[in-house]
Image: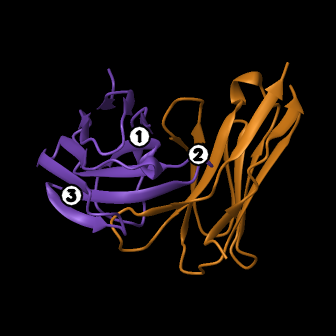
Amino acid sequence: DTAVSQTPKYLVTQMGNDKSIKCEQNLGHDTMYWYKQDSKKFLKIMFSYNNKELIINETVPNRFSPKSPDKAHLNLHINSLELGDSAVYFCASSQGNSATNEKLFFGSGTQLSVL
Amino acid sequence: QKEVEQDPGPLSVPEGAIVSLNCTYSNSAFQYFMWYRQYSRKGPELLMYTYSSGNKEDGRFTAQVDKSSKYISLFIRDSQPSDSATYLCAMPFYNQGGKLIFGQGTELSVKP
């Protein structure tokens, strides 16, 4: 059973297009995240949601819009894709919302390539 | 200066070797320290989790924290080819909802 699943696994698209990545977790966790991993493997938080409420919104272009229909799902919509958006996007979840002992469970990632 | 520094490697060792992976950090507010392992084309998975200075052992893995030097280490004993992966150190910001600051990751290859 996949704990955190995201689709699609690969996404190849043209500059200027709009695309979405979906994420679902079956762990019963309250908090979900989007992280971005660039070509140098730097992994950086983008957003987090706790029970459908936006908690963290890092300095991310407003072309990126997360949406959480319920606490088990967190989707990421990207408008007007740019070359620099090419990266691997990871969804993650954690049980609570305490920064003291957050153990994140990651999905397998969505490799986005913008041509 | 990055908040968390980690040598990206790659690091190549023979099977059975002892591996030492390290991170330095600049923010003295960090209190918890984690090591994640990431296999190729997979998401990171939590490997070790420590609080405060000292050692924590789990099987072949030992995590060490030296807060006075702002230096953390992960030791792998009797390394196996299955340990080949990228190892990322991570630290959560207190009271910021699980925001983890990751090191760049060290790519490790264990040769049979």
Q: Which mark is residue A106?
A: 1
Whether tag 3 and tag 2 are in contact, CB under 8 A, the answer is: no
Near mark 3 (Cα within 10 A), the count class, few <14, some 14-19 or many ≥20, is: many
Q: Amino acid at mark 1?
A: Phe
Position above or below: B38 against B89: above
Work out whether A47 lies above or below A17: below
Q: Give A40 or A32, whichever is nearer the viewer.
A: A40
* Residue in the image at 22% along x and 55% along y: A65
Name the residue type under label 2: Ser
Identify the residue position indicated by label 3 in the image.
Answer: A50
- Mark 3: amino acid: Asn
Q: Classify mark 2: helix, strand or loop.
A: loop
Residue A39's tag is: 2
Quadrant in which the C terminus of chain A is drawn? top left
User: Marks 3 and 1, Cα distance to the nearest angstrom?
Assistant: 16 Å
User: Residue A92 lies in what quarter of the image?
Assistant: top left
Give B56 or B70, whichever is nearer the viewer: B70
Give the chain coloured orange: B
Q: CA distance from mark 3 to mark 2?
A: 29 Å
